[in-house]
Image (cartoon, rainbow, N blue to C red):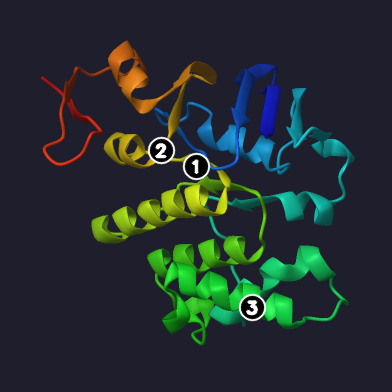
Amino acid sequence: MFEADGISVIHDRSPLLHPLSLTVAPGTVVGLIGHNGSGKSTALKVMARHLPPASGQIRIDGQDATGLDSRAFARLLAYMPQNLPLTPGLSGRDLVRLGRYPWHGALGRFGAEDQAAVEEALTLTGTHTLADRMVATLSGGERQRIWLALLLAQKSRYLLLDEPISALDIAHQINTLALVQDLAHSLNLGVVMVLHDINLAVRYCDRLAVLKKGQLQIDDTPEAVLGSGILEDVYGVTTHIIPHPHHASPVVLFGT
């Protein structure tokens, strides 16, 4: 179980994130949604130890995450930021190989198990065609896909994804979220991801955690969240919930 227990962030004496508690079980996809500036990315950065909390604690499988060194932490949790770092001079395969660093260190031997993990990650994400290209030459969507491969090669139990489909066209958005959902369920991974498209979040997440002005409003199944009427308050627009013609997930229409 991944647990964020009462984490908060304060900047210039103003709260950016009010105490937030969230649990993520293996095999579960949790979508973080809310208006721009609601604290979604801030919450994810605290969970990934990229931002120190003003209060609260992160626990992974019962362990206090502050007591883990960086490699031990990375073996349990992998994080893809919203703004991907520049990687000059690296091919796609070189980047994915970096996902194995937590397992053998900078001076450790890159063995058969590491190579197998890299090839499996490339296969799962359909990025073999990007493996020999320089990452700097890839499109934004291609970079997101190859970074997802890096996270899978890392073999962490929990994944934090900050807007993992922001640079993808609609077909690749659907394919990527379907892949994340399938991997979470089949490999027993716990996933938290920030999404802006409500209907995609409803379709591909097991739970939705809704933030408004840094405060958690509700954390429940997509159906319960839509039925609560909270989205109208969070986004300030009228919502209409209608059945999807082909699957069980409902569809949200915004506006009058």
Pick out the residue farthest to the front.
Answer: 186
> Image quadrant for the C terminus?
top left
Q: Is residue 64 visible?
A: yes
Residue type at numbered disc 1 = Met
Labels 2, 3: front one? 3
Badge 1 local density, few (<14 within 10 Å), some, or many (20+)? Answer: many
Q: In this view, does 103 lie to the left or right of 139?
A: right
Mark 3 to mark 1: distance in Å? 26 Å
Residue type at numbered disc 2 = Cys
Q: Please say if the residues under marks 3 and 1 sit with CB atoms less than 8 Å apart.
A: no
Name the element at disc 2: loop
The vertical placement of 10 against 126, above or below, is: above
All told, the count of numbered labels is 3
Labels 1, 2: front one? 2
Badge 2 local density, few (<14 within 10 Å), some, or many (20+)? Answer: many
Front residue (pair 215, 108):
108
Identified at 32% across, 55% down, the residue is 173
Q: Residue 205 carries which label?
A: 2
Mark 1 to mark 2: distance in Å? 9 Å
Identified at 49% across, 85% down, the residue is 133
The vertical placement of 84 against 18, above or below, is: below
Name the element at disc 1: strand
Residue 182: horizontal and vertical position, in percent?
43, 53
Q: In this view, does 122 lie to the left or right of 87?
A: left
Front residue (pair 220, 86):
220
Q: Residue 193 carries which label?
A: 1
Q: Which circle's residue, 2 or 3, is located before the other in the chain?
A: 3
Residue 192: horizontal and vertical position, in percent?
54, 40
Per the image, the residue denoted by label 3 is 116
Front residue (pair 162, 227):
227
Q: Which mark is residue 35?
A: none
Q: Please say if the residues under marks 1 and 2 sit with CB atoms less than 8 Å apart.
A: yes
